[in-house]
Amino acid sequence: ISGQAARDVGSAELTAVRAAWAEIANRHLAAHAAATGTAAVAIDHRSNKDRGLDEQPTVHEGGAGLIGHADRVKLNKEIRDRNARLRVLRAELQQEGVAVEQLQREVAELERQRGRIEKAKRGRAQGRHRGALAKRRRVAMATAAAAADAQRRVAMATADQVDTRAEMIAQLDEQIAALDLKIRQLQGGNSAAMLSGPLLKAAGLGIERRKLADERARLAGEDPAPRKPEPPQAEQKRPRGHKPKH
């Protein structure tokens, strides 16, 4: 027929007849279920392969008393038992699949929680690191400020010492100038007067002046001036009748 093999045409016609018969049977089965209040039963004319089932199909048993009928009944029972076990295994596998999916979701949630915890830990670690850096920075700034303050106090003390030393040197200069004036006044008389008390007083003033000059040189950081030989002191008058000891 139209270039097709008779077998293919016959198979197509048989499939169409089975589909029509399944439709008629299912309509009457549904009506019966509605009338009796039972669960509806439906049949499918397609093969297990066409329906996507992995169950083993049963064989046609034929009428009772036919040759091989008992063997076919026994075979169908074994097939139905295997299919039943297969359905149980499939249901268990489906449950296991659901459990695996649940575990996968739980693992994913745990991974997300772990990621959040790790991120929080890193944030806390960075915060502690920043805090430690800030603390070290504050310590360094405080140390630098203390050092600067100490340097400022040393500079002020040094300046005060310099001012005090300068003031003392100025006072010593005034005292030395006053002594020089007194010594010149005492040495301004005649020779007879120089052999008396003014000479002795001038000599004492000269010693005091040298001490003041040495103190001034020390404060100014200079070497003391070389000492000049002291002027001869006036010989004291010996009492009459005194003989020098030899």
Image (cartoon, rainbow, N blue to C red):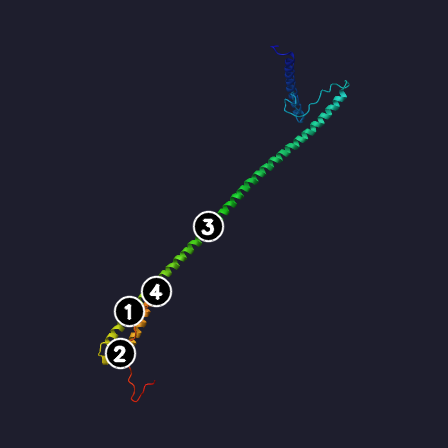
Q: CA distance from mark 4 to mark 3?
A: 41 Å
Q: Which mark is residue 161?
A: 4
> Image point 74% across, 23% down: which residue?
75
Q: Are marks 2 and 1 in contact (CB under 8 Å)?
A: no
Q: Amino acid at mark 3?
A: Leu
Of circles 2 and 1, the one toward us is 2
Q: Which circle's residue, 2 or 3, is located before the other in the chain?
A: 3
> Image point 71% across, 27% down: which residue?
82
Q: Are marks 2 and 4 in contact (CB under 8 Å)?
A: no
* Residue bearing the label numbered 1: 173
Query: In this orientation, which residue lies closer to the viewer: 226 or 169?
Result: 226
Q: Which circle's residue, 2 or 4, is located before the other in the chain?
A: 4
* Residue bearing the label numbered 2: 199
Query: In this orientation, which residue lies closer to the viewer: 5 or 91?
Result: 5
Residue 37 % position (x, y) = 66, 27
Residue 209 % position (x, y) = 30, 73
Q: Amino acid at mark 2?
A: Leu
